[in-house]
Structure formats: structure tokens, C-alpha cells
Image: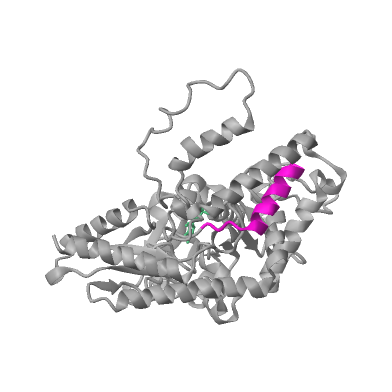
Amino acid sequence: MDSEQLREHGHRMVDFIADYYKTIEDFPVLSQVQPGYLHKLLPDSAPDHPESLEQVLDDVKAKILPGVTHWQNPSFFAYYPSNSSVAGFLGEMLSAGLGIVGFSWITSPAATELEMIVLDWLAKLLNLPEQFMSKGNGGGVIQGSASEAVLVVLIAARDKVLRSIGKKSLEKLVVYSSDQTHSALQKACQIAGIHPENCRVLQADSSSNYALRPELLQEAVSQDLEAGLIPFFLCANVGTTSSAAVDPLAGLGKIAKSNEMWFHVDAAYAGSACICPEFRQYIDGVETADSFNMNAHKWFLTNFDCSLLWVKDQYALTEALSTNPEFLKNKASQANLVVDYKDWQIPLGRRFRSLKLWMVLRLYGSENLKSYIRNHIKLAKDFEQLVSQDPNFEIITPRIFSLVCFRLVPEENHEKKCNNRNRKLLDAVNSSGKLFISHTALSGKFVLRCAVGAPLTEEKHVKEAWKVIQEEASFLLSK
Ligand code: PLP
């Protein structure tokens, strides 16, 4: 890297990004381009000779930005948020600048050690049990995604049980979750070779905000044991993707423990809220878990990707995932003096991702992070109130965090017509470009989701979003 070129181009790029943020509200939140649009705008082959940064940035403006959905726009309310912040951005920049690949301790001791330290810091903020901290057998690691997190713990759990009962028993292993669990678990089961018929997808309780009832789990486990199968893995949720439902960890964990199952908690979105003492109750029972996951890249101001995974038994991970080729051998690793994170994940190479989380924790401080979360939850509460005051709409599930699930009410209980009408409303709202919300299905209902959580969102954006939704709804209802 030529440092003078970096200085010049780096400044130019920071200016470009700063200008983007200044004007971010001028773009349609959801990109309005048609599939294949970019092929028509870019040449068929890479240039033979260098072009200038200005030329490239001109193309970014004219050709790339129209095809961008603006996740950081304050009127982005779709899916769950994916926070970017100045602190997170600076950490990313530093990580890219240092350009290290930290798969083993020796490849950059600071990368491994900082990751251990910041994950301990965050475990403390979440008041996770001591066993998840790096002092004993446990510890935290940054994965690229919640999907990778659940995959690595599923593989660790699978191999742990197969080591004691023999590899031939793979087809007897059973995985449990509610039907509200993210499809990442299904993908992990496919990859880990779990027999599709042994994935118990238990119906969540629609009367309690779609949480999994422990009695239902107990029933399923007992039936499987009677059939000679081996229950081995339970995935519970704190903040499901559809409705932010919270499974009762203590009750579920007790069943998992008494049946020697690995208990994983997916708190990808809502985990962040649990740094606030008033929301910590939602992870009560986490002491019974073997692993816990939260995406700092969702609602914790840390730029994508930064998925935090804690385990109580790091050796279950390393037994399943470690390799020791000659070309990676070194004194520290051979003497077992260090953590080599390559053995806690699927790829070998890994970025210095802890820098951005460290930056976020230091440049905000935990009190500001708590206020940040509380503000979004308050804004979601405001939105919920606006919806509930309008007789044309209904709230579908009780709001806990910053997600509001709602819809236009059905006419004379005509559910199918109602679903179509809500689908039309979603399309109309999103093609306005003024905001972006997403949808889900709950008990056959087409449900609209408004997830407050973009860093720049203020009260006025929430009010404006509701105004647009109401206007589009009135137009639809008048037809
Ligand atoms: N779990 C939950 C509850 C989620 O909401 C999501 C994504 O939104 C995931 C898992 C998957 O996350 P990732 O994209 O990090 O794999």
C-alpha cells in the first residue's frame, strides 16, 4: 500500500461516504431497480488500464447507488437492523488498514487476545455466567453470522455425543426447536448430516407470542426416547425473526440438561437489549445453556459482520473443528499456550473483527449503548401506540423489544382477502421509496413488521412512516 496514495484516496473516500450520509434521506429506501439493471450499465470486461478514483466514484453515484437499498436510512424498518456507526466504521477501516489474517495466535497475537477480551467485556455486560468467559474452559469468538454460529455448535454437539456412542448413531440424533426458529438451524442440520426426519420443529404457542412451551418439548423428547432415538440438541430463541418471541430459557434448559442435550440460545437480534438491566430478564435461564449467540452487527452499532458466540466448553468446538497441518505448526500452538481461533470456526482465515467491537465499546461506553437501545424501544412503543389507535389496523403480537407486528384488520373475518390486502399495502408502502418495512406469516396471517433500529432513526421518521402507511391504506380501502 502506497501511504501517500492511501492518504489522498482515503480522504476522498471518507468525504464521499460522509456526503452519502448527509444525503441518505434523498434516496428511495428500497432500491427501485429491475433485475439485471447493472449488466446494461457496466462493460463486459475489466479495464486493461487503470482508471481514476474519480471515474470510479462517478460510476458509484450513477450506477451503483440506484441499486443500493439503504439499510442505514433512518426510515429503514425492514427485517432486523444492521447497524453501522462511525465507531464501527473506524474499526473496519483500521482492520482493513492493518490487513492481517488472524487464524492462529501467532499470526497476530493482538487479534486473538483482543477478541477474547472484548467478548469477556460483553459477557460481563450481558451478565452471562462465568463459564462463558475465557478464564476457564469457556470463551467467546466472533463468527461471521448467526448461521455460522449455530452450525459450529451443532457440529461440536454432534461430535461430542458421537464420540461417546459411536459414529454409526448419527442417524438417531434428534434436534429440537420451535417453528419460529430461524432457517439457519435447518441449514445447519442439512450441512451437519442430521436426518431430516429427526429435526423436530415444534409448534410455538400462538397465545403467548409464539414462544416454545417446555411441556411440548418434554413430550417430543419422551416420544423420541421411547422410539430409541437420541435427543442431542435444542435451539431456543430470544427474539425470533418473525415476532421477537422469547422462549422460556429456564424451563427449556432444564429439560435439555436432564436429557444431556446441547442447549443453544439464538439471541441474534434481541441479545443487544439484554445489556439493559430491565431487559436482562429475557435471558434468565441462560445459565443452563451451552452456547449463546448475539449479532453485534444487528443492533449494537458494530458494522457487519460481527456475530458473537459464547460457549462453555471450548474443547467441544476444537475437538470437532481443529486441524493441525505441518505448515501451520508453531511453538505457542504446539505447547497449548494459546487460543487458535481457526479451530473455533469453519474457515481458516479470519479478519481482525474485534477492533470494531472494541471501538464501539470504547467510543460509546456501555451507558450510551443502553440509551441507544432504550430509545429504539421507546420509538417502537410510539409506533405501536399509533397503530393501535387506528381502527383499520391491529397489533398482532405483544411488542417486547423494537419490533411491531401489525396488519390491516380483516373485513368480516375474511382472512384470505385480508392477506392480499396487506400484501398490496406492503408493496405500495415500499414502492413509495419513503420507507421500507418487511413482512412475515404468523398462524396463516400475512403480517407487516416494523423493526425500529437504524442508528439515525428519530421520532419524526417513525411518525412519517406511520403517515405513509395510513395514506396508502386509505387509498387501498377506498377502492
Ligand atoms: N437468528 C435470528 C433470530 C435472526 O433474526 C437472524 C437474521 O435476521 C439469524 C438468526 C440469521 O442471522 P445471520 O444473517 O447472522 O446468519
- Residue 397 lies in quadrant: bottom left
Relative placement, left or right, of 321 versus 251 is right
Which image quarter is the C terminus in?
bottom left
Q: Residue at x 31, y 72 (%)?
A: 396
- Tell me which secondary structure the magenta stretch mostly adopts: helix
Q: Residue at x 58, y 56 (%)?
A: 84
Up-down relation of residue 452 to residue 332 (above or below)? below
Give coordinates of residue 40: x percent, y percent: 40, 27
Q: Toward the viewer: 143 or 151?
A: 143
Relative placement, left or right, of 280 versus 403 is right
Give coordinates of residue 23: x percent, y percent: 51, 52
Which image quarter is the N terminus in?
top right
Up-down relation of residue 470 to residue 34 (above or below)? below
Q: Is residue 235 magenta?
A: no
Give coordinates of residue 430: x percent, y percent: 34, 54
Range shown magenta: 82-101
